[in-house]
Amino acid sequence: MNSAIPPSNLTIFWDVENVADDSATHKSMTERIRRTGTIIKAYAFADWDTRRRMAEELYSLGYDLIHVPDIRDNASDYKMASYILDHLVHYPETSQYVLITGDGDFKLLAGALKERGVDLWLISNPLITASELHDLASKYTDIFSFRPALDCVNPEDCDESVQSIVKLRHLAAVQLQEVVRLIAKSGNKAGMGHARHVMKSLNPQFNESDLGFASWNDFLEWTEIQDYIRLEGEHPTTLLALPDRLPPQSVATSKEVSQAFEFLAKVAEDGVNEGTPYSLKELGIKIRELGLEFEKIGYRRFSDFVLSAEKREMIRIVSPDKEGDSPIVLPSYNVKRMHEWFEKNVERIFGPSVNGPKTTFLRKISQMLLETHTSLNELERYLTDDKLKETYFSILSASNIPFLPPFQQSYIHVLLGKDFPCHDIVTKVNIELSPLGIKLQCPD
């Protein structure tokens, strides 16, 4: 008798506006889902006019692209919910729903799916995921776990340092405090399970058993005894909160950790500004030369430290073009940093008629900077360089176009600054312009 469990029939519902990463992550995630069962349908919901390249990538991976114009808040949520309800009726053979979202608006729908006896696999960024969704999911996966693994190209990248377990416990407790702050900042409640997902996401090296605790609950109880956190309410609805007064040691350690991540990001950005991004190996050597000792803030290996910095959107680790080379490390700009830069520079660079940037635009231009290995300092330099501006306006003149929107304008200047040929530039930018009915051409 064959007792093997039959593969699941799955359907994917992806709220792209809420959860997204880069193309390598999306491909890895889709392949991983596909290996777990038979995919009946795969839907991705977004305003595809602002995500042309991503639309092509997801279409090639087999997703049905559901276009939701960005005209009101939560438009994608409403459309996705209606598709899920319709799917429940027309595809009763679906045994597992894969929801790629962290939006709390789906908690009632998730509860209804659970009551019908189907499995719910939730994939999201745990930092911005409603804790209720975590509790309702049969299975949870951090979107960033699908990123390519960081191999130890050189032995020194992954050598462990030896530290006192007592010190490591206190450093982990400070990391837990950061988790509680970030969950609260996102507007969610820090439930015990939710906090553990976020803790593991931000600190991939964390394992309570390595610290001598039999379970996650034991670790939480120890942090409460040590006055790092406060546990409120009875299990299973216990919430984590910060005490009214934090121990001075905790405040000092938290500041030291933040400064270390900021220092790493600054060094990575300096590498790009100087012309060539640092490889992982070069960055490790550089921060040592500059006096940063990551072991003192709780990281046994350099690879753990840089991965944690990446999870905090401080840097981005990119696979090398040549197999066998060390990965390169680029600066990564979150929405807050991008917003600050544009608020400061928008009128000077783009003119007084340009409105303040939307979050979608900020994310898009941040991704463009990553893809082109460009820093914010370089972007500013390219946009204000007289020679590049002259070439830019010659392309507009040849195309009989008076101006371009800020994103396409920025994209052209970056490609010009990176010495791309004109033909390659207009080909790339025309993909972004196609929804507007505009087409560039090179001067004769």
Image (spheres, rainbow, N blue to C red):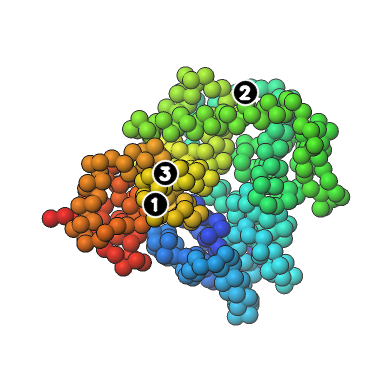
- Residue 311: image quadrant is top right
Q: Outermost residue, front direction?
A: 352
Residue type (three-letter) at the residue carrying disc 1: Pro
Q: Which residue is mark 1?
A: 352
Q: Which residue is mark 3?
A: 345
SS assignment at label 2 = helix
Q: Nearer the viewer, mark 3 or mark 2?
A: 3
Residue type (three-letter) at the residue carrying disc 3: Asn
Q: Outermost residue, right direction?
A: 234
**Which residue is found at the position 47% from the left and 19% from the top?**
289
Cα distance in 3D space between marks 3 and 2: 38 Å
Relative horizontal placement of residue 258, taking residue 321 as reference (left or right):
right
Q: Which residue is mark 2?
A: 296
SS assignment at label 3 = helix
Is label 3 in contact with label 2 (beta carbons under 8 Å)? no
Give how far across and how far down residue 55 sits, in percent: 42, 63
